[in-house]
Amino acid sequence: MSENTASDTSVNITGGSPAVAALFSHGRLTAIPRKVARREQLLVHLKETLFEPGRRYTEREVNEALLTVHDDFPALRRYLITAGLLTRTRDGAGYQRAA
């Protein structure tokens, strides 16, 4: 039985709303939106497509998952945490998708 990690999943990242799909080209995010509302749509989409509910992730796993869509994975991770879409343990070692 193989454990499904975000980095090896074949999620259709460009699926979802047309506004979110327009941010992607060939499965990669072309740019992180500057407008807060548009960025929020993207972050919700990333949370739902890259991270499983109830599963704990290491920082490396989160980074690898985000790297599949954009090179600036630290910014995406930071935005997800700030928006409350991912939670992080106090020591920063563990992450989990927020409900």
Image: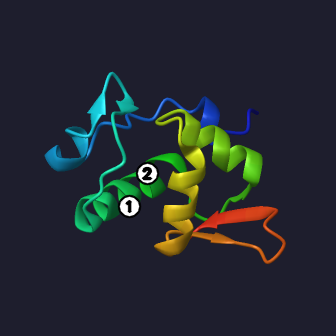
**Residue that mark 2 sits on:** 46
Q: Residue furthest front?
A: 34
Q: Please report the residue visible at 56 percent of the width from the left and 62 percent of the height from the top.
A: 78
Number of numbered labels in the structure image: 2
- Residue extending farthest to the top is 26
Q: Are marks 1 and 2 in contact (CB under 8 Å)?
A: yes
Q: Position of residue 17 (x, y in %)?
A: 19, 49
46 to 96, vertically: above or below: above
Q: Residues within 10 Å of mark 2 (few under 14, many from 20)?
A: many
From mark 1 to mark 2, how far is it between C-alphas?
A: 5 Å
- With 12 as the anchor, is 65 left or right in this view? right
- Which residue sits at x=79%, y=78%? 90
**SS under mark 2:** helix
| Image mark for residue 44 | 1
User: What amino acid does circle 1 point to?
Assistant: Val
The foreground one among 32 and 94 is 32
Q: Which mark is residue 69?
A: none
Q: Is residue 50 left or right of residue 8?
A: left
Q: Is residue 99 visible?
A: no
**Residue 52 coordinates in the image, percent (x, y):** 57, 55
Relative to 5, say whether 26 is above or below: above
Q: Nearer the viewer, residue 2 or 93?
A: 93
SS at badge 1: helix
